[in-house]
Amino acid sequence: MVKVFSGIRPSGKLHLGNYLGAIKNWIELQNSAQQSIFAVVDYHGITTPYDPKTYQQQIMDVVLDYLAAGIDPDPSADGPLLIRQSKVPQHTELAWLFNTITSIGWLDRLPTYKEQLEKTGVNNMALLDYPVLMAADILIYKSNLVPVGEDQLPHIDLTNEIAKRFNSLFGETLPVVKPHLAEGFRIMSLQDPTKKMSKTGDEGIALSDDPDTIRTKIKKAVTDSGKEVRYDEKEKPAISNLLTIYHLLSGKEIKTLEKKYDGQSYVEFKNDLAEVVVNFLKPFQEKRKKFEDNPDRVMEILTKSEEKARVLASSTLKEIKERMGLE
Ligand code: AQP
């Protein structure tokens, strides 16, 4: 039985990396999996500096982005669920239980922890513990497939370490979790192709950017030396990244694109890419507006999904507590 779980922090506007690395796969999996749960992981979002005054809006913005991208929750049947993490408190309760079997040495060597420390300068317990809560997010539903971008792979490994240790200490309870990588598992920054496109500290292309903003951002995107539009991650990381975005959004093969732009300049290539992105995001933005104009419907989707998620989560938590001698 395939059970899917994934989430995104509401730490800023969702960008093409979030879409191509994660959400696109969620949409492909949501109908074939027996269970799929997609979360706005708002407890993860407060592990780095944030503004409480705008946080509710940020959470709702991510909800709208999910719905506009094609997440199709159906909480009344056995369809996909769309939840806010903090509305299902069993996630954090399980994280506490997992803390008791997680070695600190497993956490402080994780690359994402080190990167966030460097980026924010804030070193709090929650930042270190973030991957344990992520393990709980996944395992509270006994999920076994997690569609994520490449940066999250060490967290999936940690989830399996925790599950393995739990099973060996308390008896076979938790499943093996597999990551599911999309073709766009690593979309790089438009300013620095050695770094991934990010919500914070990066001028990535937001799904909600208007056409002129998109055109300006692509025009300003760094390019490599030389003139050729050619895919070569080592020699031409910036152009390779732009070619990947072009390929994934247009469905055209990279080889076909290289031929099309043979003898043409970066400027022509970038102008066309900008129109590909604008056209791709147009229906998304129209759909988003429809949901935005219907907040009651959105709230109903969330509350019904969360109610159902609490039932599923309570059942796993009860089993885990019994195993641990807490009930
Ligand atoms: N550039 C990317 N390319 C491919 N996939 C990506 N993801 C994020 N950036 C890229 C994937 O999107 C999902 C959500 O990630 P997240 O927001 O929970 O955490 P993050 O990886 O820390 O995202 P950001 O955008 O970089 O946010 P900030 O700036 O707040 O740290 C994950 O599946 C991730 O792999």
Image (spheres, helix red, strand yellow):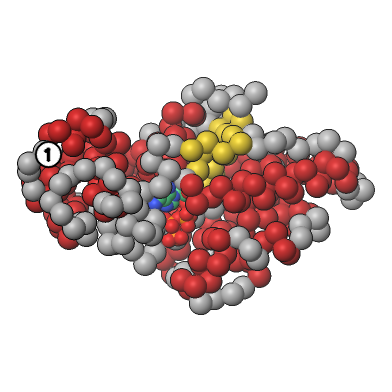
Q: Is residue 324 visible?
A: yes
Which of the pair 33/247 is nearer the observer? 247
Q: Position of residue 227 (x, y in %)?
A: 13, 51
Residue at 49% across, 24% down: 31
Location of the N terminus by quadrant is top right
Q: Position of residue 45 (x, y in %)?
A: 52, 61
Which of the pair 206/119 is nearer the observer? 119
Going by the image, does 39 lie left or right of 140?
Answer: left
Q: Position of residue 265 (x, y in %)?
A: 8, 48
Which of the pair 236/99 is nearer the observer? 236
User: Which picture quadrant has residue 200?
Assistant: bottom left
User: Which picture quadrant has residue 272?
Assistant: top left
Q: Position of residue 279 (x, y in %)?
A: 18, 38
Count of numbered circles on the image:
1
Disc 1: CA contacts within 10 A as few (<14), some (14-19) or many (>=20): some
Q: Is residue 208 visible?
A: no
- Residue pointed to by mark 1: 261
Going by the image, does 166 lie left or right of 311?
Answer: right
The answer to whether mark 1 is within 8 Å of ligand 1 is no
Q: Is residue 124 above or below residue 214?
A: below
Q: Is residue 41 above or below residue 167?
A: below
Which of the pair 101/90 is nearer the observer? 101
Residue at 59% across, 75% down: 123
Q: Is residue 32 above or below residue 22?
A: above
Q: Amino acid at mark 1?
A: Tyr
**Considering the numbered disc 1 on the image, is that residue within a helix, a strand or a loop?**
loop
Residue at 55% across, 61% down: 111
